[in-house]
């Protein structure tokens, strides 16, 4: 038996608040109004059994209510101290979402669903969490290396860049590949994309691209000498260009993004070369479907078409307007080994 909090699926035509009001009553016989519910956050839950978006609410109660559980769904209930909550054998992800959600959003809170009030939580804690990504001014100056050589892997999803970079690193040990999976451990990033694609709330694309932009900047800025960076600030530039061409973001939104992009770009030492991986949209769609990544299941064909065009146009912009060397790497019919050999022979061998 595992413990959890009142929860359930949203039925057709229901809002999240209406769903939790209904589920709370069905599971506990507690009646509440939407005014008494405070939204905490949304979380993208992924485990071996399912993948779903989870909205977390908190209800403040002035007194401990009598509970009548639905015996078809539950066998027991218990009021507990909040601090004891993680000690219970919980259903997957409840411990993390409740803890993260409360710390991220609340200053003080009366959480009588679990018992007595918990201690005050500082809203500024989010800044403390971000300190690990920050550099001191002195370290920033010390790490600015105008003699650094670095390379960029650039291209739309499914173009084969990551697979090719793995082949390069395997075949040529002197080549260092620097990559991060931005979606792997970020609830925020997954939340933004699910709201943008699944719920068609396109404003969340801006939040996503702005946060990715600064992350890609630091990834590029801190890259080691003679390394290949798997994606950089050029990638969110291409993605945002595609969003603008689709009219999913307005011009003033694109302009805001581009202003920030130019700020980051002015600090970076230009890469020796951008390795632009490209192929037909048909092959992109086949590869995206084959690798079956959760977010990419939402990609409509026309979105991938616009992405492919935006990356091509951005490569031309980088070459003609920014003076950056581009190595065009067509991947429709080439194996990762062949691509790796071509990149080594044409770009890396004489520079690394």
Image (tube, rainbow, N blue to C red):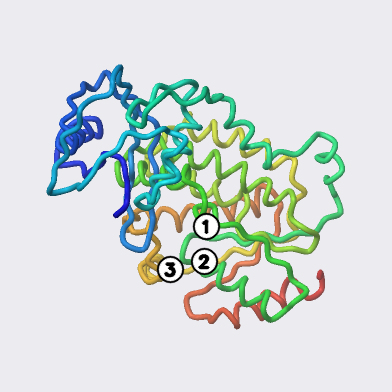
Quarter the C terminus occupies: bottom right
Dot 1: what SS?
helix
Decide: is 58 above or below 146: above
- Image side of residue 198 versus residue 333, left or right: left
Decide: is 17 above or below 93: above
Which of 7 and 113 lies nearest the eye of the viewer? 113
- Image side of residue 147 versus residue 284, left or right: right
Distance from disc 1 to disc 3, alpha carbons, whole Å, reads 11 Å
Distance from disc 2 to disc 1, alpha carbons, whole Å, reads 8 Å
> Which residue is identified by label 3?
280
Q: Position of residue 220 (x, y in %)?
A: 69, 51
* Marks 2,1: beta carbons within 8 A: yes
Distance from disc 3 to disc 2, alpha carbons, whole Å, reads 7 Å
Give me the residue at 53% from left, 32% from top.
Answer: 255
Q: Position of residue 273 (x, y in %)?
A: 71, 61
Dot 2: what SS?
strand
Q: Position of residue 164 (x, y in %)?
A: 59, 73
Which of 204 and 139 lies nearest the eye of the viewer? 139
Decide: is 344 above or below 192: below
Dot 3: what SS?
loop
Give me the residue at 45% from left, 45% from top.
Answer: 87
- Image side of residue 275 versus residue 163, left or right: right
Q: Nearer the viewer, mark 2 or mark 1?
A: 2
> Which residue is identified by label 1?
312
Residue 278's label in the rendered image is 2
* Marks 3,2: beta carbons within 8 A: no
Q: Earlier in the sequence, mark 1 or mark 3?
A: 3
Q: Earlier in the sequence, mark 2 or mark 1?
A: 2
Task: Indicate the quadrant where residue 36 lies.
Answer: top left
Give me the residue at 33% from left, 59% from top.
Answer: 297
Which of 257 and 209 lies nearest the eye of the viewer? 209
Q: Position of residue 349 (x, y in %)?
A: 78, 76
């Amino acid at each position: 038996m595992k413990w959890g909090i009142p929860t359930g699926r949203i039925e057709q035509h229901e809002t999240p608040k209406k769903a939790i009001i209904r589920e709370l009553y069905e599971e506990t016989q507690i009646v509440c109004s939407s005014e008494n519910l405070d939204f905490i956050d949304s979380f993208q839950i992924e485990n071996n059994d399912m993948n779903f978006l989870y909205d977390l609410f908190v209800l403040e109660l002035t007194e401990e209510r009598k509970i009548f559980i639905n015996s078809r769904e539950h066998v027991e209930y218990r009021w507990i101290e909040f601090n004891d909550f993680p000690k219970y054998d919980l259903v997957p992800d409840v411990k993390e979402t409740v803890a993260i959600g409360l710390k991220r959003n609340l200053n003080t809170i009366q959480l009588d669903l679990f018992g007595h009030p918990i201690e005050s939580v500082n809203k500024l804690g989010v800044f403390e969490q971000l300190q690990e990504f920050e550099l001191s001014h002195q370290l920033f100056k010390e790490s600015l290396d105008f003699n650094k050589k670095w390379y960029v892997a650039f291209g739309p999803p499914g173009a084969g860049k990551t697979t090719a970079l793995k082949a390069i690193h395997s075949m040529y040990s002197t080549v260092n590949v620097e990559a991060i999976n931005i979606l792997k451990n970020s609830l925020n990033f997954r939340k933004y994309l699910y709201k943008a694609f699944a719920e068609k709330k396109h404003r969340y694309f801006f939040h996503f691209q702005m946060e990715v932009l600064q992350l890609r900047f630091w990834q590029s800025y801190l890259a080691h000498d003679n390394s290949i960076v798997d994606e950089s600030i050029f990638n969110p530039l291409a993605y945002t260009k595609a969003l603008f061409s689709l009219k999913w973001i307005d011009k003033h939104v694109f302009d805001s993004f581009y202003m920030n992009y130019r700020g980051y770009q002015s600090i970076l030492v230009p890469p020796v070369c951008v390795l632009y991986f490209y192929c037909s949209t048909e092959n992109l769609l086949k590869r995206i479907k084959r690798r079956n990544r959760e977010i990419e299941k939402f990609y409509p064909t026309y979105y991938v078409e616009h992405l492919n065009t935006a990356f091509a146009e951005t490569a031309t912009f980088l070459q003609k307007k920014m003076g950056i060397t581009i190595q065009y790497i067509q991947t429709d019919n080439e194996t990762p080994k062949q691509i790796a050999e071509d990149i080594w022979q044409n770009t890396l061998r004489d520079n690394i």
